[in-house]
Structure formats: structure tokens, C-alpha cells
Image (cartoon, helix red, strand yellow):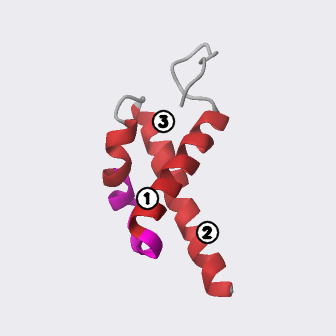
């Protein structure tokens, strides 16, 4: 992500967290396909770690949760089709 970070803390803004999580989820889906729906949260954490290792621990955890929830929602959506 390119841009400026305007904040009084080192935490990413909510918008930046969601943008990063969206990009990572798309990348993982393009790589693994529908197998991402079977990943445990710990597996998602391991896969995204190289992309978020420079973030604060709290932000890393938030991104993992968001990505995992995106996969769960996508799985539910596909099952309803």
C-alpha cells in the first residue's frame, strides 16, 4: 500500500486494515482457489505473515481475523448459490 499515514498512533486506520485484508484475501484466493475456505485461522496467519510482519502485532492479528472472516463469508455465499 502506498500513501501517507496520518495518525497519532502507529496503528493502521480501519480503512487501511480492510484494504490490506481485501488485497491479501484476493491474493490467497488467486493462489489457492476455493481451498482457502478450508483454512483455519492459524493457517491464514501463517500465510499472510510475510506480508504483515512489519505491522504492529495488533494490526497483524486484525488483518488475519478480517481475511479469515472474508473467506468464511465467501464460503457461505458459495454454498447458498
Q: Give the vertical position of 46 relative to 56 (above or below).
A: below
In this rendering, position of residue 32 left or right of residue 4: left
Separation (CA) of disc 1 from disc 2: 15 Å
Q: Which residue is mark 1?
A: 28
Distance (Cα) linking label 3 and label 1 = 19 Å
Q: Which residue is mark 2?
A: 73
Mark 3 Cα-neighbour bin, 10 Å: few <14, some 14–19, many ≥20: some
Q: Secondary structure at mark 1?
A: helix
What's the magenta bit mostly, secondary-structure-wise?
A: helix
Q: Observer-nearest residue: 41 or 26?
A: 26
Above/below status of 8 relative to 23: above
The region drawn magenta spans: 33-45
Is mark 3 in CB contact (under 8 Å) with mark 2?
no
Horizontal side, residue 75 vs residue 47: left or right: right
In this rendering, the answer to whether 81 lies above or below 42 is below
Residue found at x 39% / y 34%: 57
Q: Residue furthest front?
A: 30
- Which of 64/31 is in front? 31
Amino acid at each position: 500500500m502506498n500513501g501517507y499515514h496520518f495518525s497519532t498512533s502507529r496503528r493502521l486506520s480501519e480503512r487501511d486494515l480492510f484494504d490490506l485484508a481485501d488485497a491479501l484475501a484476493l491474493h490467497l484466493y488467486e493462489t489457492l482457489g476455493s481451498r482457502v475456505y478450508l483454512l483455519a485461522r492459524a493457517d491464514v496467519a501463517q500465510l499472510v505473515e510475510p506480508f504483515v510482519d512489519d505491522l504492529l502485532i495488533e494490526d497483524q492479528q486484525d488483518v488475519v481475523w478480517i481475511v479469515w472472516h472474508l473467506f468464511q463469508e465467501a464460503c457461505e455465499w458459495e454454498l447458498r448459490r
